[in-house]
Image (cartoon, rainbow, N blue to C red):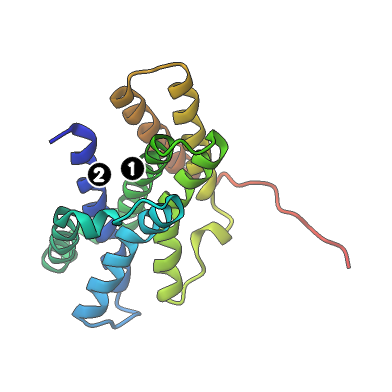
Amino acid sequence: MSLIYSIDIAGTFVFTISGALAASDKKHHHDIFSVFFTGFITAIGGGTIRDVTLGAYPVAWIHDINYLMAVFAGVFFTLIFRRYIIRLSRTLSIFDTIGMAIYVVLGVQKSITFEVNLLAAVVLGMVSGIFGGVIRDTLLNEIPLIFRKEMYATPCLLGSALFVILHLFHVEEQLNFILSVLFIFGFRLLATKYNWSLPRLTFRE
């Protein structure tokens, strides 16, 4: 089992926790199935859109049962330990950021192996990272993070571009993977801590 594959499964696990935590929030009053479904769609949403776009069939979670096992494990972990992990400061944000960073880099890496143009690979990397969260927020009737003031898609786009640049300089693949994930994770946390945001556009009627 390769390091990157192991990280992929771990990313599925933590992204599931992000979705399951959001659905199990008191204000949503969801049952166990709803919590599972939200965790599941959060974990596989972005990757599924990426694979369908690339024509990568069968989609990863259909082909490999370990992804579904990671989803089940993430949901049960959340249900059992929610009372404890929810006490951690910004738990949902941390799990979401970890999963997002991993999925972005996996997305751009897989796109490159399918020999798409590099700009498309950057975009698909971003799609892999953010669309699970977009679907989660939409299902929960929340405004998706990409439409809020805080930076969400920008770290993904820059991290995806970083992976491509390092790839062009022939940086070893696993080192490139780790550096790009850490960049996205660190950028996102700093942006959240210091309230970084892009300039707002104002349109006159």
Check disc 2: other Cα within 10 Å, few if <14, some if 14-19, many if 20+. Answer: some
Query: Disc 2 residue type?
Result: Asp
Asked which secondary structure carries label 2, the reply is helix
Task: Say which label, 1 or 2, has the lower sequence index.
Answer: 2
Split into 4 quadrants, where in the image is the C terminus?
bottom right
Q: Position of residue 63 (x, y in %)?
A: 21, 55
Query: Disc 1 residue type?
Result: Ile
User: Image height check: is 12 above or below 138?
Assistant: above
Q: Where, by quadrant of the figure, is residue 112 drawn?
A: top left
Q: Position of residue 15 (x, y in %)?
A: 29, 55
Which of the pair 163/20 is nearer the observer? Answer: 163
Check disc 1 and report the residue beneath it: 102
Which residue does the image show at 71% across and 53% down from the upper left? 200
Which of the pair 136/161 is nearer the observer? Answer: 161
Check disc 2 and report the residue beneath it: 8
Q: Position of residue 147 (x, y in %)?
A: 57, 61
Which residue does the image show at 25% across and 53% down from the upper left? 12
Split into 4 quadrants, where in the image is the N terminus?
top left
- Total marks shown come to 2
Which residue does the image show at 75% across and 54% down from the upper left? 201
- Residue 165 shown left or right of residue 204 in the figure: left
